[in-house]
Image (tube, rainbow, N blue to C red):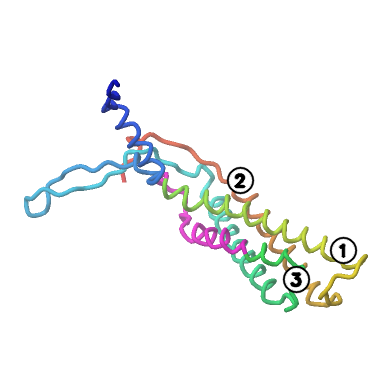
């Protein structure tokens, strides 16, 4: 039986790059070079070789957008947490509440992005843009979807409860109304956040166009 052909070095290298790219998404944006240290020795230094991303909005407009994105992110978090806290203790058949709890994950990412957005238009590495401006926009959409699913579940629950008897269900209370109102406020905040995110326009520059 013929021995299997060994894999070429090129194929192995391509496979390695794919694996590294999946695990370290921004590896290709950086290069490690040797430089002269302060005491004459050689040291390793990482430099950015990727493209630069810069918001093209006017400074005043950009600052206003960022401010509102941060305010709306805070509103979405506060209203969602309050909705969970104020919801009646009876949870039988109310599967829409766990869906709302899951929204805390994209909300957490959204907060992380909101606090790292540059206060003024500036040149950003791709990684910083993705983990600040882009993260806020995408997280807002994810949270909005979960809010909508939770709201739809809430509506379905009360429709079913009104036309039939659900075992373990309790009568509609004021807290249910407050919960629904806070859920609507959370969704409205996220929808508006996404609209502000869409207003940010960016330009992409070659690496040699900007030197920090």
Horizontally, is 23 left or right of 77 in the view?
Answer: left
Residue wearing tag 3: 179
In the image, 4 versus 44, the foreground residue is: 4
- Looking at the rendered image, the disc whose residue lies closer to the viewer, 1 or 3, is 1
* Residue with the most extreme top position: 2
Answer with the quarter of the image where residue 103 lies: bottom right
Q: Mark number for residue 48?
A: none
- 137 drawn magenta: no
Q: Tag 3's secondary structure?
A: helix
Q: How many marks?
A: 3
Residue 82 sits above or below residue 212 on the image:
below
Q: Are marks 1 and 3 in contact (CB under 8 Å)?
A: no
Label 1: how many Cα within 10 Å (few below 14, some 14–19, many 20+): few
Q: Where is residue 58 shown, x and y percent of the image?
A: 53, 46
Q: Mark number for residue 198?
A: 2
Q: Tag 2's secondary structure?
A: helix
- Looking at the rendered image, the disc whose residue lies closer to the viewer, 2 or 1, is 1
Horizontally, is 170 left or right of 15 in the view?
Answer: right
Give the extent of the magenta segment: 102-126
* Residue with the most extreme left position: 40
Q: Mark number for residue 160?
A: 1
Q: Tag 1's secondary structure?
A: helix
């Amino acid at each position: 039986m013929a021995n299997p052909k060994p894999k070429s070095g090129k194929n192995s290298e391509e496979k390695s790059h794919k694996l590294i790219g999946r695990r370290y998404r921004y590896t290709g944006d950086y290069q490690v070079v040797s430089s002269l240290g302060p005491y004459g020795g050689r040291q390793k230094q990482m430099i950015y070789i990727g493209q630069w991303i810069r918001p093209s909005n006017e400074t005043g407009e950009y600052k206003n957008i960022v401010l509102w994105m941060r305010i709306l992110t805070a509103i979405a978090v506060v209203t969602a947490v309050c909705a969970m806290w104020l919801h009646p203790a009876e949870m039988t058949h109310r599967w829409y509440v766990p869906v709302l709890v899951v929204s805390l994950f994209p909300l957490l990412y959204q907060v992380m992005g909101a606090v790292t957005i540059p206060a003024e238009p500036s040149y950003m590495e791709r990684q910083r843009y993705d983990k600040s401006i882009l993260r806020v926009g995408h997280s807002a959409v994810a949270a909005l979807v979960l809010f909508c699913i939770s709201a739809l579940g809430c509506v379905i629950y009360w429709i079913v409860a009104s036309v039939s008897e659900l075992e373990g269900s309790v009568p509609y209370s004021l807290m249910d109304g407050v919960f629904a109102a806070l859920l609507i406020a959370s969704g409205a905040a996220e929808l508006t956040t996404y609209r502000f995110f869409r207003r940010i326009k960016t330009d992409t520059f070659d690496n040699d166009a900007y030197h920090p």
